[in-house]
Amino acid sequence: MDRGLARSRGQARELITAGLVRVADRPAGKPSVDVDDATPITVEAGDHYVSRGAHKLLGALADLDLQPYGRAVDAGASTGGFTQVLLEAGCEQVYAIDVGHDQLSRRIRSDPRVVVWERTNLRDLELRHVDQRPVNLLVADVSFISLRLLIAPFDRVLRDDADMLIMIKPQFEVGRADLGKGGVVADPELRRAAVDGVLRTAAETGWAVVRVAPSRVPGGSGNQEFFAHLRRREGLSVPRTYASIS
């Protein structure tokens, strides 16, 4: 970061993990290696997005035929990949909210359309985090917590006609006993049950499923993840099966 080769610590880790960073003309093995100021560091050319999460959201927007607009919340903003996509899609304001801190790309943080909330537990989400005005869109990419615990807090900051686009990660929805090697949920039935559990919680909170699609980009450990597009709609129930979940 000090040399201007990465926009954030999160992006630096992703570049190293992807094998795009070379130290003294050798691949950087891990992010924790100490390097003195005289050692040359190079980064192979990549795209302009601040994280691979941007590509996850781009794929979901295309697959689910959803066009972001207006004011939005990026729940679990991290480096800012989702926020970046929302801004480029035309959102006039994005509230980037995360329990962590110092992760958001400086380029995203400095954009006047971005309102940053760090050290903020998403379970405590309230209207004050969105200037007391409900937003029309919420996107979510969270880890180490079940989305079933977050649907109600998300509901508090959304308009009656809002859209919710959540990324469901089975590895954080099933119990530890159902995780395979490397924390991967390999059983399709367990993945289906994980998605179903989140959608049923959403239905109980007044949200109906528009469509579910698998993420085009796998999780960091190779887990298959899923995007669910939800809208408030009275009288609709969660479908019993999802052809796209496997």
Image (spheres, rainbow, N blue to C red):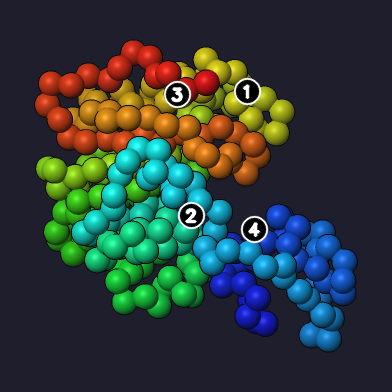
Tell me how far mark 2 sits from mark 1, CA to CA: 25 Å
Q: Which residue is mark 4?
A: 14
Residue at x 14% of width, y 47% of height: 159
Q: Which residue is mark 2?
A: 54
Instruction: Check the image and report above or below for 109 versus 61.
Output: below
Q: Amino acid at mark 1?
A: Ala
Tell me how far mark 3 sits from mark 4, CA to CA: 28 Å
Discs 1, 4 touching: Cβ within 8 Å: no
Q: Nearer the viewer, mark 2 or mark 4?
A: 2
Which sits earlier in the primary sequence, circle 1 or circle 3?
1
Per the rendering, the mark at residue 226 is none
Q: Give the x, y percent position of residue 214.
A: 47, 32
Q: Amino acid at mark 3?
A: Ser
Q: Which residue is mark 1?
A: 186
Query: In the shown orientation, is residue 38 left or right of residue 128?
Result: right
Q: Tell me the SS state at disc 2.
A: helix
Residue 147 visible in the picture? no
Query: In the shown orientation, is residue 163 left or right of residue 121?
Result: left
Residue at x 12% of width, y 26% of height: 234
Per the rendering, the mark at residue 244 is 3
Residue 48 visible in the picture? yes
